[in-house]
Structures are given as structure tokens and as C-alpha cells.
Image: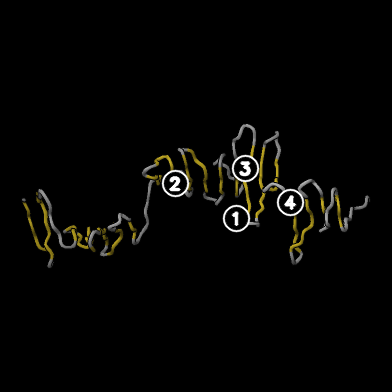
Amino acid sequence: YEISACLVGSEMCIRDSDVSGGLGIAESLFHTGDTDTRVAFTAADTISLETGGSQRLSIGSNGNVNIITGDLVLPDVISHREDLNTKIRFPAADTISMETANSERLRINSNGQVTIGNNFTQTSRLLYVENTLADGGEIAYIGNNDGSSNYGGLIISAGETDRECRLESAWGNSFMTFYTNDGSASERFRIGSSGQIGIAGANYGTSVSYTHLTLPTKA
């Protein structure tokens, strides 16, 4: 060992030293010209970093890294150690994106617009969801399933025939309803599983039923 020691107040400092093997320290390492900046050992199996006399970061015995105060500033990427092509990125100012298999899947831009699937530079719509299937297909499912008897949903498809937009009721033998609200929500229009149509809350039969239907008169 070659150790050059000094005292800073009641604490010993080490400088210009060559230590082979281990150096035991009771509590902390600090810079002699800035004694409130430290590497500290605040508990068993724990190490922490301090600036300005305050703890900023600690690594506990379980390996968890805790940022006590301040922000974690990154240039671009957060990656999973075992799967480096799965990422959270910051590809532009005020923008965040998510990638899997090295391909961008979702982006939120500076205007709060959310883009999923494709065309990530779009800025015309608050929510933009697009696929690139050669033969078209299902784009989204929105639904409910309690695992018992309360289930239903809406499937949105596109491009299965050229320029088609398709709305489909999910879950097999199902139907679609349309409600409006005049103080309380009421069913106004229904399409049954076989194509029957009910208007204004009618009990629909095999074709078209309605309680009242007012058509405009020709001027």
C-alpha cells in the first residue's frame, strides 16, 4: 500500500495513493474540494451517491436502483437487457416511441397525437391506427368479456375489399345497437344477427320493424 492521507475537519482524506487489495471505509468517499459530494455506504449491502449533501441515487441489496431526487436523463433509448431490440425511444424533441423486434409500433408526438402501426410522421389525427396487410383485415377489437355471460364487442376491419371500412359485431351470433341520449340513453336503431332492422326501439322480426318513422316531405 502507498497511502497519502490528510484531514478535512474530523474526516480523513486519501490522495495520490496506490492501494492493492481492498480498502475498508466505514461510511463514505468524498472529494476533498467538495466534501458534500460522496459515494456513501448507508446500510448493509447498499451504496448511494450524494451531491449537495443530499442522497440522489441508491443501489440496494436486491440490485434495485432507486433515484431519490432529480431526473434520469437519457440521450435516446431504454432497452431490455435480454432483448435489446425491444425499446422505449425518444426519436425527436417532445416525442416518445415504442419498438419491438427493432420496428416502431407506437408513437406519441409533441401535439399528443398517438400513432399505432404505420405512418408515424402523421400530424392530422389525434388517434391514428393503420396496418399494412396486403389483403386487408381486422385492425381493432373493442369489447367486454367477464368470462361468464356478459360479453360483446366491436371489430373494425379495413381493406378486405378495396377501400372498404367494415364494422362487425363480435362473438358469433350477435347484434349491433345504436343509442342516443336525451337525458337518458335509449336504443334508436338495431341490426340483428340475420340482418333484421329495428328502428326507434321496435321489437324487430325477420326484416324491418319500427314504432314510428318520420320521413321528410318533398318541398
Residue furthest out toward the top: 134
Mark 4: amino acid? Met
Residue at the image position 25 percent from the left and 64 percent from the top: 53
Q: Is 144 left or right of 212, judged from the image as shown?
A: left
Q: On residue 88, which mark appears?
A: 2
Foreground tag (3 vs 1): 1
- Residue 67 point in image, percent of width and height: 34, 58
What's the colour scheme?
secondary structure
Discs 1, 4 touching: Cβ within 8 Å: no
Residue named by callout 4: 176
Residue furthest out toward the front: 148
Mark 2: amino acid? Ile
Does label 4 or label 2 sit earlier along the sequence? 2
- Residue 207 point in image, percent of width and height: 85, 48
Q: On residue 74, which mark appears?
A: none
Q: Is 184 left or right of 138, judged from the image as shown?
A: right
Residue named by callout 1: 147
Residue named by callout 3: 139
Does label 2 or label 3 sit earlier along the sequence? 2
Residue at the image position 5 percent from the left and 51 percent from the top: 2
